[in-house]
Image (cartoon, rainbow, N blue to C red):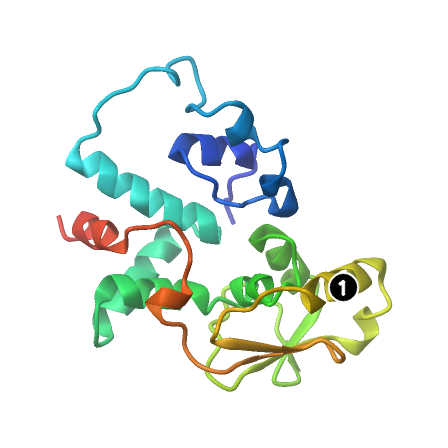
C-alpha cells in the first residue's frame, strides 16, 4: 500500500505546527519546526493569505498526517461518521481515535503512532486475547489490549513497558502496568482528543 516515506519533519513544517510524528524528539530542540519555523521548499519563507478552501484542505491534511491515514481510507472514515448520529466532525475524530495503532500510542506502548503501527503489524499485541495485526482495527468499549507474553522479554517491549508506566492516559482508557494490559473504558469525547484540528473545516471541505 502506498504510504509517505519521506522526512516526516517536513510535514510538521508544512502545516506550521507540531504533529508529534517522531515521538520524544518533537519535545526537544532537535525538532525541525523549532529550528526552521517556515514551510519547506524555496517559497517556504513567503506568506500568502490562505483561501477558505486552503484552510479547509490544511485541516484535512493535518488530521490525515497525525493519524497516518491515506486519502481513500480517510474518506471512508468520513462517510462512516456521516452515517452516525451526532456531529459529523466529532464522529470522525472518535473513529480515528479508535484505531488500534492510535490506542497503542495513547496507552504509551509506543513512542509515536508510526512506531505503534509497526508494532501492531509485527504481532506485539492481542485484543481480547486474540492476535490482531491490523493497525486500522477499530476498538470497542470493553476491548482489552495486551502485550503478548512471548514479546515481553524483547528489548523494545521492556522499553515501551517502562514508558507506559509513567504515561498520562486519556479518560477513556485504563492501563495495568504490572501486566502491560490496557482497556477501552468508554468511547472518547471531543474534550479527550487533544489534536490541533478544527474538524468542522474538514466537514465543510467534503460538503463542497
Q: Nearer the viewer, residue 100 or 110?
A: 110
Residue 35: x percent and y percent?
55, 24
Identity of the residue drawn at 24% across and 38% down: 55
Identity of the residue drawn at 78% across and 59% down: 159
Q: Residues within 10 Å of mark 1 (few under 14, many from 20)?
A: some
Q: Is residue 131 left or right of residue 17?
A: right
Give the mark count: 1
Identity of the residue drawn at 22% across and 72% down: 83
Residue that label 1 marks: 162
Secondary structure, mark 1, is: helix
Identity of the residue drawn at 57% across and 32% down: 7
Q: Is residue 76 left or right of residue 21?
A: left
Residue 69 vertical placement versus 47 (above, below): below
Residue 143: x percent and y percent?
54, 83
Residue 90 vertical placement versus 205 (above, below): below
Q: Quadrant of residue 133?
A: bottom right
Q: Is residue 138 left or right of residue 135?
A: left
Residue 44 vertical placement versus 99 (above, below): above
Residue 10: x percent and y percent?
50, 30
Q: Nearer the viewer, residue 126 or 25?
A: 25
Q: Quadrant of residue 104?
A: bottom right
Residue 115 vertical placement versus 127 (above, below): above
Residue with the most extreme left position: 208
Residue 21: x percent and y percent?
55, 45
Amino acid at each position: 500500500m502506498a504510504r509517505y516515506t519521506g522526512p516526516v519533519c517536513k510535514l510538521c513544517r508544512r502545516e506550521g505546527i507540531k504533529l508529534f510524528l517522531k515521538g520524544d524528539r518533537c519535545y526537544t530542540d532537535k525538532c525541525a519546526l523549532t529550528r526552521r519555523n517556515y514551510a519547506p521548499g524555496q517559497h517556504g519563507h513567503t506568506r500568502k493569505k490562505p483561501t477558505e478552501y486552503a484552510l479547509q484542505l490544511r485541516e484535512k491534511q493535518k488530521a490525515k498526517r497525525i493519524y497516518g491515514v491515506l486519502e481513500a481510507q480517510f474518506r471512508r472514515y468520513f462517510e462512516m461518521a456521516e452515517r452516525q448520529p451526532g456531529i459529523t466532525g466529532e464522529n470522525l475524530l472518535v473513529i480515528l481515535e479508535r484505531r488500534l495503532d492510535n490506542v497503542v500510542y495513547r496507552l504509551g506502548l509506543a513512542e509515536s503512532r508510526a512506531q505503534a503501527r509497526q508494532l501492531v503489524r509485527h504481532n506485539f499485541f492481542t485484543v481480547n486475547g486474540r492476535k490482531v495485526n491490523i493497525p486500522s482495527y477499530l476498538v470497542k468499549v470493553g476491548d482489552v489490549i495486551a502485550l503478548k507474553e512471548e514479546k515481553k522479554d524483547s528489548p523494545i517491549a521492556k522499553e515501551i513497558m517502562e514508558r507506559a508506566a509513567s504515561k498520562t492516559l486519556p479518560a477513556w482508557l485504563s492501563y495495568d502496568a504490572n501486566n502491560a494490559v490496557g482497556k477501552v473504558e468508554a468511547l472518547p469525547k471531543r474534550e479527550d482528543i487533544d489534536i490541533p484540528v478544527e474538524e468542522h473545516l474538514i466537514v465543510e471541505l467534503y460538503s463542497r
